[in-house]
Amino acid sequence: MGEERWFFRSDEEWTTIAERLKQTRCPHCKVLGTLIRHGFLYGRDETSPKKETVRARRIFCSNRNARPGCGRTFSVWLADKIRRLSLTTAALWLFLQHAITLGILAAGRAAGCRLNERTWQRIWKRFDHGQSKIRTALCGRCPPPESPPRLPANPARLPAAQVLAHLQAAFPDTHCPIADFQHTLQTFFV
Ligand SMILES: [Zn+2]
């Protein structure tokens, strides 16, 4: 049975996943041999604000022609995309780091995407709610650092600063630890 990979980074990696579909169990019904390619999921982000780009590949668990699948679809995501948000992991990383030190509004401006303040507030909240899940996932890789590299101006943001420092410690040699998080742990960051 193939290892389940729901994030990929390159065409080569996608080809490997696609070639193994027949040996991969459906994540919903766990049946083997029913998964087939089913097109693309498109969306915009700050790297391509006017034109939609591929965000994910769709997979179908086939129940057609008497196949034993469950008929459900799911997506295999590019590791630098974020579901339901029109920004990349790199922009999110920039935003979250600045949100700790500068506050949400200034951080939104620094991230270089044209999203309104309400959207940035919503993104922060989404990250905030997911913090304990992120922390647990990171603890499987390395212990948290003793103290965060930059102490936040707002003490209420200290736990968030610790999570970001932990993320950076877990993936030190990369320009975007969030993409590495998704790709390595095969789970959404937010
Ligand atoms: Zn299925």
Image: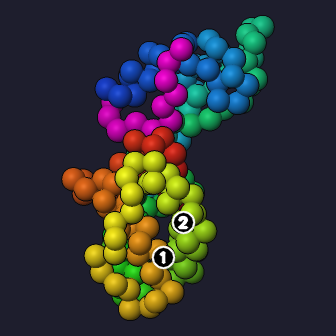
- Residue 152 in picture, x, y percent from top left: 38, 86
The local secondary structure at tag 1 comes to helix
Q: Are marks 2 and 1 in contact (CB under 8 Å)?
A: yes
Question: Would residue 82 be visible to someone looking at this image?
Answer: no
- Residue 33 in picture, x, y percent from top left: 62, 12
Checking the image for residue 131, the label placed there is 2
| Scheme by which the image is coloured | rainbow
> In the picture, residue 64 is in which quadrant?
top right
Q: Give the residue pinned by disc 1.
A: 159
Q: Is residue 73 above or below residue 162?
A: above
* Real-space Cα separation, disc 2 to disc 1, in angstroms: 8 Å
> In the picture, residue 60 is in which quadrant?
top right
* Residue 20 on the magenta segment: no
Front-most of residues 90 and 113:
90
Residue at horizontal 50%, vertical 35%? Answer: 6
Q: Is residue 142 above or below residue 125?
A: above
- Residue 42 in picture, x, y percent from top left: 50, 45
Residue at horizontal 43%, vertical 61%? Answer: 87
Under mark 1, the amino acid is Pro
Q: How many marks?
A: 2
The local secondary structure at tag 2 comes to helix
